[in-house]
Image (cartoon, rainbow, N blue to C red):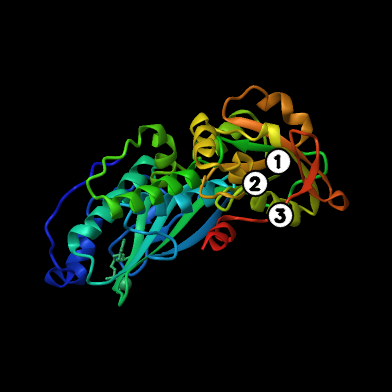
Amino acid sequence: MFEEKDSARTPVSELGEFKLIDHLTKHFKIHHDTTVKGIGDDAAVLQPKDKQQWVVTTDLLVEGVHFDLSYMPLKHLGYKAVMVNLSDVYAMNAEAKQLTVSIAASNRFPVEALEELYAGILAAANGYKVDVVGGDTTSSTSGLVISITALGCAPAEKITYRSGAKENDLLVLTGDLGAAYLGLQVLEREKQVFQVNPKAQPDLEPYSYLIERQLKPEARKDVPKLLDSLKVQPTAMIDISDGLSSEILHLCKHSQTGCNLYEEKIPLDPQVMATCEEFELDSTTIALSGGEDYELLFTIDADDFPKIKGNPNLTVIGHMTAASEGSHLITRANTKIPLIARGWDGMSQEEN
Ligand code: ADP
Ligand code: MG
C-alpha cells in the first residue's frame, strides 16, 4: 500500500485559493484526446468520439458519514474516492475517461494534508488513465467533504443497464466478496486496542488482503475489456458497493425478474473464511450484507456460458427466474431463503 508521510503544517490561508488549486493540480496529466481543455479555464471542454455515448456518475463523501480519518489515511481516501466513481462507470460497461474533483475542507486540514489527498487522487488517475479536468475548492466549517464526478464513454450497443436481465440468464460475479467489510472490522478492533494500549504492536499480516481491500480498493477496469474480448455482451450489470444481496435485488427489480443465488458458489478468499471463524461471523452473511467490494455483478445469456467457462476472474453464482418466483438464496443444505436487502448501512445501524 502507500507509504505514510510525516509533514509540516502550512495553513491553506498562507497560499490562498488560486495558488492552492495550482499546487494541488499541477501534476495531473492528460491521457485522452477526448479532453480538449482540462483544468485552467471556466469549464473543461470535451470532444465526444463518433457514435459513442457518455456516462456520467457522481459520489459525495462526507467525513464522519462515509469515512473516518482515524483509520483511513488521506492518500488512501483520495484513491478510494476515485475508485468508487470509476467502479460505477465500469458497471455501465463503459471506459472511464475524465474526472472532476471538488473538495471542502475545514482549517483542521493544512496544505500538507490536502497534498496527501491529491497524491492518492493522482495515483488513481495515472493508474487508471483518467484525466482530472476540473473541480472546485472551498472551505468548510466542519471536516472534509469530497465530491468526484466521473465521465466515461462506450458505443451505445455496449452500454449495460440494470434493467436488461431475462429469465434463465446466468448471474456472474467478478472476484470475491466480504474482504472489505472484514478489513474495516479488523481496523476498528485495532483502533480500540490502540486506545487502551498505544504501545501494542498488532500483527496485521493475517489480514493483509482484507485491509488492502478496505483501504485500497481497485475498480474492475479490466472487466469491460475482458467481456469485449470474450465477445460477451452482458444483459444487465451493477457494481457491488452495498453487499451482494442488495445489488442482486436491484438487478431483479429493474429487470423485472426473480433469481436463485447458490450459497456454495459465492467466491470467498481464504483470509475471509479464516477471519469469519475468528470473529464468529457467518461468511455468507458477510458476502451478502458486507459492502465496498467494488466487484461487478452481471447477467449473461445462458448460451454465452461456454465463452466465460473456466475464466478465473468470473464465477457463475446463480441464474435469473420469473419475477413471480421471487429472489432466493439456495443454501448448502438445499433450503430456499428469500433474499433481503441488508446492505452496509443496515448492518452498521444494527450494531450501534
Ligand atoms: P471558478 O471561479 O470558475 O470556479 P476556480 O478558480 O474555482 O474557477 O478554478 C480554476 C480551475 O481549477 C478550473 O478549471 C477548475 O475546474 C479547477 N479546479 C478548481 N478546484 C479544483 C480541484 N479541487 N481539483 C481539480 N481542479 C480544480
Ligand atoms: Mg471554483
- According to the image, label 2 marks what residue? 237
Amino acid on which the number 3 mark rests in the picture = Ile
- Sequence-wise, the earlier of marks 1 and 2 is 2
Which is closer to the viewer, label 3 or label 2?
A: 3
Left or right side of 94 for 192: left
Ligand 1 is in which quadrant of the figure? bottom left
- According to the image, label 1 marks what residue? 299
Please identify the residue farthest to the front as the structure is shown: 196
Picture coordinates of residue 320, whole percent (x, y)? 78, 43
Amino acid on which the number 2 mark rests in the picture = Met
Left or right side of 264 for 31: left
Is the residue 104 above or below the residue 155 in the image?
below
Picture coordinates of residue 252, whole percent (x, y)? 75, 52
Q: Nearer the viewer, residue 245 or 348?
A: 348
Q: Is residue 111 visible?
A: yes
**Disc 3 and disc 2: Cα gap in Å?**
19 Å
Which numbered circle lies on residue 338? none
Please say if the residues under marks 1 and 2 sit with CB atoms less than 8 Å apart. yes
- Sequence-wise, the earlier of marks 3 and 1 is 1
Secondary structure category for the residue under label 3 = loop
Picture coordinates of residue 39, whole percent (x, y)? 30, 60
